[in-house]
């Protein structure tokens, strides 16, 4: 007698039986089935509770949306880290979306069939993992949401940095003066090709020599001027100490003139005056040379500072994700509204990334979970029985082989013993025959 274990079809039921009152229902085909597959739902079990199909279809959609969000997040991050077209980055985004969907699918499918209070304990590590993944996925999207303000902040910050950089170089390398040797300027020293320092030192030396020569000339000139005035007073007949009061070219007048002329000649006042005139001309020339050198040095310093600033601007490169993160931090420090808004967006994205685990946790134990739990329990019992049966089968086979081996052992031992007895009997018979033969031979000899 055979028992029909197949589920009844709709055609086998009376026409007055309402649709949906028999189980299992016909398998469902379409997009919903594919979405439920993301959550690890077994359709042959869900066919017994078709009322759960919408719940698990939306759960699969949540898992798909989470993966899609992760893919978009990676595309945004890679776009900030590279300059290639987003089309070329699309495979990486799809791969990351697949990884997140697979992982979230495992997080959900591994909880099917869990019942009772232990369910929350199982979900705690899954929620922790979801939060960590959500934080990683949310950050590029947060930066993308605030991108206009962030880019403006980055550009303004870079411009301020360049301005401060240029100002420090100009402060430490003033035009027309040596570079400052302070601690703040230790890293801002410029070395130029045509330094005005040598021209300035030469001018300072020429001025110093001219001033020394002029001081000596002025002292000698003052002495000569006194002698010259004394001679003129004597010759004019002026009265006073050391004067004769006689006008005309007398002996004292000639002597005083001779003393003044000899002093002027001995001290080379005319040559000294010519040397001072030449020194002043050289100083004028050196002053012009120093001005030219300072102008050239100023141009070279300006060009060197411009080159430094240009190099720093080129080194800044494109705006990266770290630049955006720093800029968002500065905006948050200056504006409480930005601080609150960026954390609200971040927490919202993290919550969306945690939705698969949260949805499963908040939905409680469904009828599908009960069926899965029962089927798992039945499968466990069947497996135990199967293992027990296989154990008994293997044990029985081993016992049969053992008995068969012992039987063969006893049979072979009996055969060996029988052969041994036959051999001993033959030896005894042969020995008796030999004894009889020897006895007959002895009798014949007698």
Image (tube, rainbow, N blue to C red):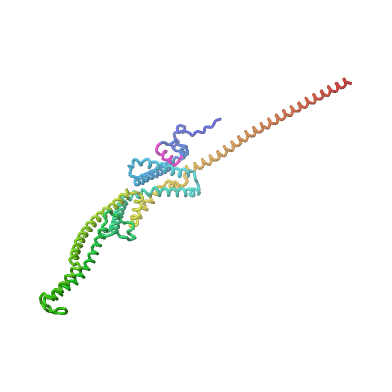
Q: Residue furthest top?
A: 444
Q: Position of residue 203 (x, y in %)?
A: 24, 61
Image quarter hosting the N terminus: top right
Q: Residue at x 19, y 65 (%)?
A: 272
Horizontal side of residue 298 vs 130, given as left or right: left
Identify the image quadrant of residue 3.
Answer: top right
Q: Relative to 233, does residue 388 appear above or below in the rendering?
A: above
Q: Residue at x 70, y 29 (%)?
A: 412
Q: Is residue 50 visible?
A: yes
Image quarter hosting the C terminus: top right
So how many labels did they put on this image? Answer: 0
Q: Position of residue 413 (x, y in %)?
A: 71, 30
Q: Tell me if residue 233 is in the magenta stretch.
A: no
Residue bounds of the magenta highlight: 30-41
Q: Tell me if residue 37 is in the magenta stretch.
A: yes
Q: Is residue 22 visible?
A: no
Q: Foreground: 248 or 148?
A: 248
Identify the image quadrant of residue 257.
Answer: bottom left
Q: Foreground: 26 or 322?
A: 322
């Amino acid at each position: 007698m055979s028992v029909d274990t197949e589920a009844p079809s709709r055609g086998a039921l009376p026409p007055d039986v309402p649709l949906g009152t028999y189980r299992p229902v016909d398998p469902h085909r379409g997009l919903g089935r594919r979405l439920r597959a993301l959550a690890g739902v077994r359709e042959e079990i869900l066919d017994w509770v078709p009322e759960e199909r919408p719940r698990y279809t939306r759960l699969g959609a949540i898992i798909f949306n989470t993966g899609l969000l992760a893919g978009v997040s990676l595309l945004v991050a890679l776009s900030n880290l590279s300059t290639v077209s987003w089309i070329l980055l699309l495979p990486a985004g799809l791969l990351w979306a697949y990884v997140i969907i697979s992982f979230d699918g495992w997080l959900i499918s591994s909880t099917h069939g869990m019942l009772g209070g232990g369910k929350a304990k199982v979900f705690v590590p899954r929620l922790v993992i979801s939060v960590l993944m959500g934080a990683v996925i949310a950050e590029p999207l947060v930066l993308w949401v605030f991108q206009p303000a962030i880019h403006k902040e980055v550009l303004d910050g870079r411009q301020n940095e360049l301005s401060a950089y240029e100002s420090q170089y100009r402060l430490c390398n003033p035009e027309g003066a040596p570079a400052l040797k302070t601690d703040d300027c230790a890293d801002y020293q410029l070395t130029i090709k045509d330094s005005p320092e040598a021209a300035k030192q030469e001018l300072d030396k020429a001025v110093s020599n001219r001033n020394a020569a002029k001081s000596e000339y002025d002292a000698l000139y003052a002495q000569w001027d006194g002698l010259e005035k004394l001679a003129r007073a004597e010759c004019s007949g002026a009265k006073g100490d050391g004067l004769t009061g006689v006008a005309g070219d007398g002996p004292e007048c000639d002597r005083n003139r001779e003393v003044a002329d000899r002093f002027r000649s001995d001290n080379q006042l005319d040559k000294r005056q010519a040397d001072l005139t030449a020194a002043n001309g050289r100083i004028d020339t050196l002053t012009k040379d120093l001005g030219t050198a300072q102008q050239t040095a100023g141009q070279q310093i300006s060009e060197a500072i411009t080159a430094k600033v240009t190099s720093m601007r080129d080194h800044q490169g494109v705006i990266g994700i770290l630049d955006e993160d720093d800029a968002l931090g500065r905006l948050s420090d200056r504006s409480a509204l930005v601080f609150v808004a960026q954390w609200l967006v971040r927490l919202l994205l993290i919550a969306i990334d945690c939705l698969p685990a949260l949805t499963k946790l908040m939905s409680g134990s469904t009828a599908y979970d009960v069926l899965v739990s029962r089927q798992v329990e039945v499968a466990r019992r069947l497996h135990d029985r199967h293992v027990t049966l296989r154990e008994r089968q293997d044990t029985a086979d081993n016992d049969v082989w053992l008995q068969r081996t012992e039987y063969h052992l006893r049979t072979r031992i009996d055969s060996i013993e029988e052969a041994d007895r036959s051999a001993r009997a033959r030896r005894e018979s042969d020995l008796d025959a030999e004894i009889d033969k020897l006895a007959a031979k002895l009798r014949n000899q007698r």
